[in-house]
Image (spheres, rainbow, N blue to C red):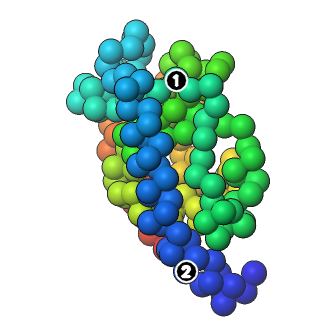
Amino acid sequence: MDGREDKEILDQLQQALPGVRKWIDHYMEAHAHLAVPIAELSFDRLSQYFDQSRLKTSKAVKVDRVQVPPLSKMGLPYFTDFEETPFAGITYMDTFFLAPPVQDCESTHFHELIHVIQWGVLGPDSFLMVYAVGLLAHGYENSPLERMAYELQRAFEARRSIPQLELQVREETMLVAKALS
């Protein structure tokens, strides 16, 4: 792609944001009665990495199938593969949605909590833009926000200490946003 195409895609992303946010808000409202604060789940290790306030305000929802906004129908055909990917989990703001078989997996909850922090740092519009640009530029596995979550998840799974995890995620998220803007 050339610079002009990149700008057009960014403009299309920007124009689609209100529709994407509306879809997310509706999805969250439809599942609000199923949301459970992470602090109420029986995971022993998450409190070693996250503040208690984060665990009280972040929520998990068990779903049969994780859904993503219909981006291609919102004028963003570049995300068809993303829409068709069967994700195990996805985070929208302070709530994440988990499908079988990872609904009770502490490691997956850890990963999604990283995304909760990222959403909080960037806010909805910036998070969606940074995430989308990362997907387009690097693909899912190598998109910067996912790569950060997966690297930290591997450290969690290896039972490594991650000093000042939340500060580290906040700082790295800001660097990613700056690099992709």
For the question of whether residue 49 can be seen, the reply is: no
Q: Position of residue 158 (x, y in %)?
A: 57, 21
Q: From the viewer's perspective, is residue 62 above or below residue 136? A: above
Q: Is residue 51 left or right of residue 79?
A: left
Q: Quadrant of the N terminus?
A: bottom right
- Identify the mark nearer the N-term, 2 or 1: 2
Task: Tell me the SS state at disc 2.
Answer: helix
| Nearer to the camera, 123 or 68 | 68
Which of the 4 image quarters holds residue 42?
Answer: top left
Q: Which residue is painted at 35% across and 57% down in the image?
A: 123
Residue at the spot of label 1: 62
Q: Which residue is painted at 23% across and 30% down in the image?
A: 53
Q: Amino acid at mark 2?
A: Asp
Q: Which residue is painted at 66% across and 68% down in the image?
A: 76
Classify mark 2: residues with Cα within 10 Å, few (<14), some (14-19) or many (20+): few
Q: Residue furthest left?
A: 53
Q: Amino acid at mark 1?
A: Lys
Q: From the viewer's perspective, is residue 109 above or below residue 20? A: above
Q: Position of residue 159 (x, y in %)?
A: 51, 19
Answer whether labels 2 and 1 touch (C-beta < 8 Å).
Answer: no
Residue at the spot of label 2: 11
For the question of whether residue 12 can be seen, the reply is: yes
Q: Position of residue 84 (x, y in %)?
A: 75, 47
Q: CA distance from mark 2 to mark 1?
A: 34 Å
Classify mark 1: residues with Cα within 10 Å, few (<14), some (14-19) or many (20+): some
